[in-house]
Amino acid sequence: MKKFIIASTNEHKIREFQTMLKPFGIKVVPYKDVIKGQFEIEETGATFADNAKIKAEAICEKTGLPTFADDSGFCVKDLAGFPGVRSARFAEEVGGYDKAFEDIKNRLNGKCSEAKFVCNIAFAVKGEKTVQFEGKCYGFTVFPPRGENGFGYDSIFVPNSFGRTFAEMDDAEKNSISHRSVALAQFIKFIEKLTKEAEKKTAVKPLKTKATKVDAKIEESIPVVVEKEEEKIVVDENTFSVEVDEKFVAPEVPFSSESDEKK
Ligand code: ITT
């Protein structure tokens, strides 16, 4: 089983990643389990991509282990993408999520708006270029909040084509359509590609054999094969040679509606 460190303290996020990555043989270890004592990361970036990179690289640098981070948030179209990268901080500043919902409702004058969740995942490996993947889930706001599951802004967001908020869905249903699962699907594809490449490099090579007819006179019809000892190379399963495929690097893009996305 591979082990990746997650540069997050948000236990809901951590649990979602653990659930979604387990079937792929990847164990997700929170960085607080590895780094003892206080270690805070300042999210000084202007975009989800910037902040995900800051978090993943800070923990990778500190631990030397393959680390990924998620920077995510809730963006309301009629509020020009607010609260966006500030989603967690905004809720904290106004005194919790109930207050944040009330504030957003007031800013919208009680009207419904299109909205989206965005998740950017950055994966950092020591000595390699960090790779990033982005996922979005489009829908709209609802007030009052509905549902008890999930976390953050889940109870005021209804994904398109669904009549229920994220908070009214169970984990499996949310995980099948969420921004996090869309970004994660690309991340998994990338890991699978790396794993295949690593396997190819370490596969036991076909034996280079010399078929030597030892004594043709005695055993004319039976070729004697002299086998050389197998050469088996063992590598640490966490050690990858990361080849950055530019098409995997998802840039931060401005808000676009579902119709934009389909283009
Ligand atoms: P870490 O930085 O330690 O991972 P955080 O919660 O501060 O934890 P972010 O800076 O990425 O993480 O902020 C993400 C916030 O966006 C999160 O706290 C929620 O308010 C909101 N959010 C992101 N994904 C969400 C989801 O699936 N459901 C509801 N709200 C979500």
Image (cartoon, rainbow, N blue to C red):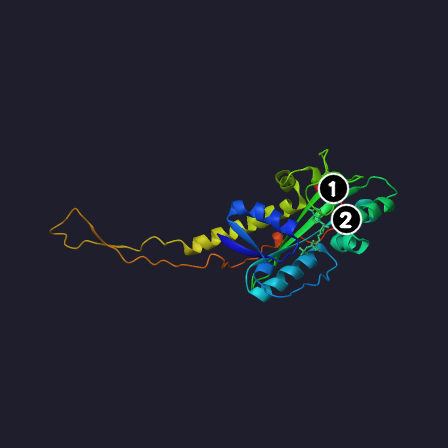
Between residue 249 and residue 62, name the one nearer to us.
62
Query: In this rendering, is residue 42 above or below 97?
Result: below
Task: Mark 2: give few (<14), some (14-19) or many (20+) Cα within 10 Å.
Answer: some
Query: Which residue occupies 76% across, 50% down?
Result: 254
Query: Ligand 1: does it lie within 8 Å of the C-beta at label 2?
Result: yes
Q: Earlier in the sequence, mark 1 or mark 2?
A: 2
Residue visible at 71% across and 55% down in the picture: 48
Circles 1 and 2 in contact, beta carbons < 8 Å? yes
Q: Is residue 101 above or below residue 208?
A: above
Q: Which mark is residue 51?
A: none
Name the amino acid type tagged 1: Ser
Q: Report the side of 207 relative to 141 (left or right).
A: left
Looking at the picture, how far across and down is residue 205, in whole percent? 36, 54
Viewer-nearest residue: 32 or 68: 32
Q: Position of residue 224 (x, y in %)?
A: 20, 52
Indicate the secondary structure of the residue bearing disc 2: helix
Q: Residue furthest right?
A: 109
Q: Which residue is mark 1?
A: 155
Residue 25 x %, y %: 50, 48
Quadrant of the image occupied by residue 181: top right
Q: Quadrant of residue 49?
A: bottom right
| Cα gap from disc 1 to disc 2, whole angstroms | 10 Å
Tag shown at residue 97: 2
Q: Is residue 90 left or right of residue 249?
A: right
